Image (cartoon, rainbow, N blue to C red):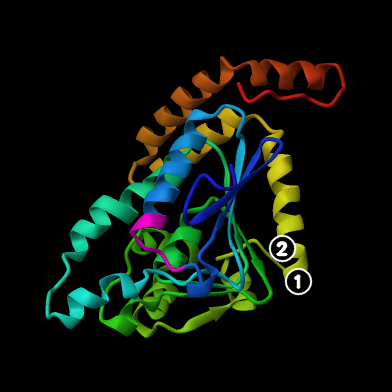
Amino acid sequence: MADAYETLRVENDGGVRVISLNRPDVLNACNDRMTADLTDAFKQIERDPGVRCVVLTGAGRAFCSGQDLADLEAKYREGDVPVLGERLRKGYNPLIRRIVELEKPVIAAVNGVAAGAGCSLALACDVRLASEKASLIEVFVNVGLVPDSGSSFFLPRLVGFGKAMEMSITGDKVSAAEALSLGLVSKVVPPDQLMPTALELARRLAAMPTQAIGLTKRLLYGSATRDLPTQLEAEAFAQETAGRTSDHKEGVMAFLEKRKAEFKGC
């Protein structure tokens, strides 16, 4: 499992799949290979009922420093203009959608800098935990570009329009402490406690009713574009679906029998 990908380290911890971006020599900058590896890794998770929660982190001292500009250096030096929109449509955009649409919880364990597309990657996860040494930077403007890979969608929803605009047009670094105060991350812990904390939460989520969590993700993301009557109907449909699961019956019976529920994710 750990050697299945060139740019990732992938390990299992019971029902938890831990994915570590593994290009520490370049602060886990994304190249085409890493984007493809990540997209495939999430595709495999989607198909594997044994995986009920995901932890995404970085090897070494960074989470992900964004796009590896060395990948494009030759084109720029030759005077070529890369078609960046196509790179997004074929690379980052499918990856971000895979994470968001995965009907299993995804935790980002942000161990160091998360910049540019790396910041977007963290924002696309359902929960973000951060090391005290972590930072998040919408760095795109520093190279004359705009936020991409979902940052323009996630950031204003997490921190509000004004702060999202400030972060996006200044490219200023946000420390772990500020990220916590803004609601960008849920918890900040000492570096040596990041993975134990992330795994503790992941194991808890992996033992919960997975289909209910997946339906909840779908409802919350869909609410961004629906009016109230449409959202109410979406809730009714999702609740009907959840009500047919074995985990719903187990939850009810456990409550009635005054015991701890044993959810199976189905």
Q: Is residue 200 above or below residue 258?
A: below
Query: Quadrant of the image for the C terminus?
Result: top right
Q: Is residue 223 visible?
A: no
Q: Quadrant of residue 13?
A: top right
**In which image quadrant can residue 166 be found?**
bottom left
Q: Dot 2, crowdedness within 10 Å: few (<14), some or many (≥20)?
A: many
Quarter where residue 144 is shown = bottom left
Question: What type is the residue that disc 1 sits on?
Answer: Pro
Q: Position of residue 118 (x, y in %)?
A: 45, 66
Q: Outermost residue toward the right? A: 258
Instruction: Indicate the position of residue 70 as horizontal and vertical percent values.
Output: 33, 75
Q: Check if mark 2's residue and mark 1's residue have beta carbons within 8 Å.
A: yes
* Location of residue 151 with respect to 259 vertically, above or below: below
Tell me which segment is drawn in magenta.
29-34
Judging by the rendered image, the residue that carries numbered circle 1 is 190
Position of the N terminus, as image quadrant, is top right
Identify the residue under disc 2: 194
Nearest the viewer among 159 and 119 is 119
Q: Quick check: is 204 in the magenta stretch?
A: no
Is residue 69 left or right of 2 when viewed as pictured?
Answer: left
Residue drawn at point x = 17 percent, y = 69 percent: 82
